[in-house]
Image (cartoon, rainbow, N blue to C red):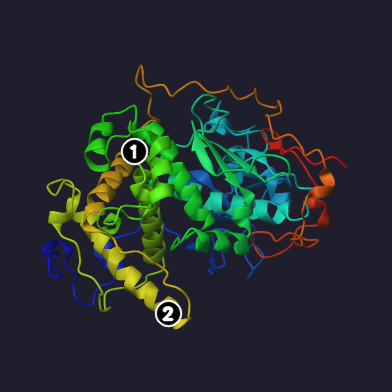
Amino acid sequence: MPESDSSSAQVHSGGSLADELAAPAVSRAYVCQCGRPVYLRNSQCLACGTPLGYVTSRVGVLPLAPTDDPELFTVFGEPDGPRYRRCANFSTAAGCNWLVPDAQEAEPGLAHTHGLAPGLCLACSATRTIPDLSVPENPELWQKMEAAKRRVLSQLLALGLPISTRLADPDHGLAFDFLSNLPGSPRVLTGHQDGVITLNIEEGDDAQREKTRAEMREPYRTLVGHFRHEIGHYYWDVLVAPTPWLEGFRALFGDETEDYGQALQRHYENGPPADWALRYVTSYASTHPWEDWAETWAHYLHMADTVDTALSFGVNAVNVELTSDLFTREDLWQPEHEDADRFLDFLNGWVRLTNVLNELSRSMGQPDFYPFVLPHAAVGKLQFIHQLVTAQRGQPAPVRAEGGEPAPVQEPPPVGDPVPVQDPPADPSSVATDVAQPDQAPTPDGGALPPAANQPEQMPGQTLQQPLAA
């Protein structure tokens, strides 16, 4: 059993979580030039009116200063620094606050290092298909999808994980298809295949998502969680399958060559094994090694981002009565690894933090912020993912080993050509639009876009899901 007084997990009296872990991987606490706090979603400081934007190379939201070109900005206080322009989706329902490097002054190829579509930022360039925005509820649902995606991609950038869009790597790049259910067509299923992540935009409807969560008896279901899970499948293809990490994966998660279809069928017919809570982070993780990986990967990203946010704001989680013991070296996959103590501090810092956050949730009469209990068997898997992630920092994008190519799939069309989409239903009058959409869509800074921003608009490099016939 773990001991709460383990030397590797010892917390100094009077210290804070920040003291224990030294510093966050990247700060989530952003500050305007006026000194007021601003947040990841903001495009303007509500205190002083300074424009704000997310700069990928700086991994954060920064105050901006105008230039002699009304379309261009520099970082405030850096008049001779790089110039940026707003993402073209800033003025759409997506309300994107990310910035695009000015291609005219960039070094050759710099503006397209990650495969940016013309006028679009990295996050929006990764979106391949957007829903039909003429359907009244879709602009708001699309905005929620993009906001959650930006949150996750900003964390991946902070962790130093490689992000290549389909424009940079047509075969293995990352792409998102945000689709809605169309009457007369198969239901859109959320999933991943060869770098393409498909999400049903009804997950952006809070009531529908909660209904699904209750029906599936899940303790947790969020848009951010969907993105983190599905992108876990993507990184398994990129960072594990074609690399020496595969051996460690199989030792911890199992043999991924087990028939996936049969595993899913068995899970939905019989449910998880009786002892799943002793071996997996969630019941769904028990389905197949691939799902165990994706669920544990998402869990690690949840932990890392929450801890980074807490550290950034100086949250103190030390003086708290624990409802569970802390973990020790005996729980680790590689207890003698040079980074083992730091990972253990991170893990036990998480245990302390979630005890505080759960109490705060209960104080508001809400369900627990963290409705999970980490089993000892999952700790080694989390350490494996931690080591894999930290190994990527400062490394070039991985190259697939010969013979490690994925199964052939239909090639994406050239940039600018339409992407195949679902056929419209034969009877457009059967479309249900019982979710009211306001005339103005919210922007990241709490303001509102003009009504024209809700009109269907296809950005370069993005495909509009085929609208219904009039």
Picture quarter with the C terminus: top right
**Residue at the front extreme, as displayed:** 269
Q: Quadrant of residue 337?
A: top left
Q: Position of residue 230 (x, y in %)?
A: 47, 44
Q: Position of residue 60 (x, y in %)?
A: 50, 53
Q: Residues within 10 Å of mark 1 (few under 14, many from 20)?
A: some
Tell me the amino acid under the disc marked 2.
Arg
- The disc at residue 362 is 2
Pointer 1 residue: 392
| Residue at the (73%, 49%) spot, across then down | 92
| Residue at the (29%, 70%) spot, across then down | 352
Tell me the amino acid under the disc marked 1.
Gln
Q: Earlier in the sequence, mark 2 or mark 1?
A: 2
Q: Residues within 10 Å of mark 2 (few under 14, many from 20)?
A: few
Which structural element holds mark 1?
A: loop
| Residue at the (64%, 61%) spot, across then down | 44
Q: CA distance from mark 2 to mark 1?
A: 38 Å
337 to the left or right of 405: left
Picture quarter with the N terminus: bottom left
Tell me if I can see residue 160 in this picture.
no
201 to the left or right of 136: left
